[in-house]
Amino acid sequence: MDVMRVSEAADALQVNDRRVRQLIERGDLRAQRFGRQWMVRRDDVSNLRASTRVAGHPFSPANAWGVLALAEGRRPSWLSESERKRLAGILAERGIRALMPLLRRRAERETWFVHQSLLGRLMDDSRTVRTGASAAESLISADTLEVYVPSIVSSDVAAEYYADTASWDGNVLVRVIDGPWPFVPGEDSVGPVVAALDLLDQPGDDRRVRIAEELLSHA
């Protein structure tokens, strides 16, 4: 696995070491401690560096999910009418593809390892919603499962499934939403725009990119 030290990531992102540690705490960079040294994934640094070249500040979680809801023809009930109109105008002007780099604060990513015998129960749990390759399972398969979970219950879910939440090579990519829960009761899988966004969030897999493009073309 290609990793780099905090100081190297800081040089690549043209920030100081403290800023890199803030990005780790926020979930924008995945990291693991080796002794006294934090190491981050090189591909995460590359993705973050590319995304920051897009003009504009990242949307808050509430507004990011508002944009995604509007892109899928849904009404983001957690936003005021004026905010919905503002985001709808931005979406109409720029399009969802151009806005994708600004939606990265929609959730914080965690990698869990869950025993194989418990994976099915986790994916069917009413507190989780499938995304990425797990949402597009009829089109693509993956070794790592992908779900959204609300931050308010994420620790309970992890404990219930005996998850190793500090695993470097986990088998479940968990996206923790610290904000409005954008899914309706009983919804077990994300819509096509969110699935495509999460597929594109994992670099280095051409098939994921092709499936994402197919999902977006029908959205």
Image (spheres, rainbow, N blue to C red):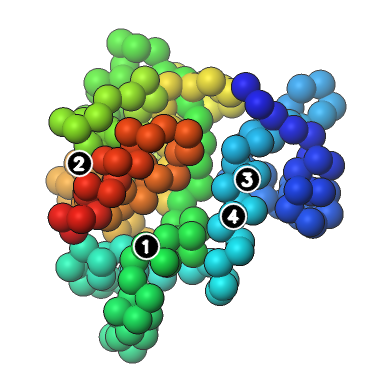
Which residue was labeled with disc 3? 46
The first of marks 2 and 1 along the sequence is 1
Residue 97, numbered label? 1
The first of marks 1 and 3 along the sequence is 3
Q: What residue type is labelled 1?
A: Arg
Residue 198, numbered label? none
Dot 1, crowdedness within 10 Å: few (<14), some or many (≥20)?
Answer: few
The reply to whether dot 1 and dot 3 touch (C-beta < 8 Å) is: no
* Disc 2, SS: loop
* Disc 3, SS: helix
- Residue drawn 41% across and 32% down? 205
Residue 50, numbered label? 4
Tell us which disc is closer to us: 4 or 2.
4
The first of marks 4 and 2 along the sequence is 4
Front in this rendered view, residue 169 or 196: 196
User: Does residue 216 appear left or right of residue 198 in this picture?
Assistant: left
| Spot occupied by residue 73 in the image (x, y as percentages of width and height) | 17, 68
User: Does residue 70 appear left or right of residue 115 in this picture?
Assistant: left
Quadrant of the drawing holding the N terminus: top right
- Label 3 and label 4: CA atoms lie apart by 6 Å
Tell us which disc is closer to us: 2 or 1.
1
Q: Which amino acid does label 4 sit on?
A: Ala
Residue 38 appearing in the image: yes
- Residue drawn 66% across and 26% down? 2
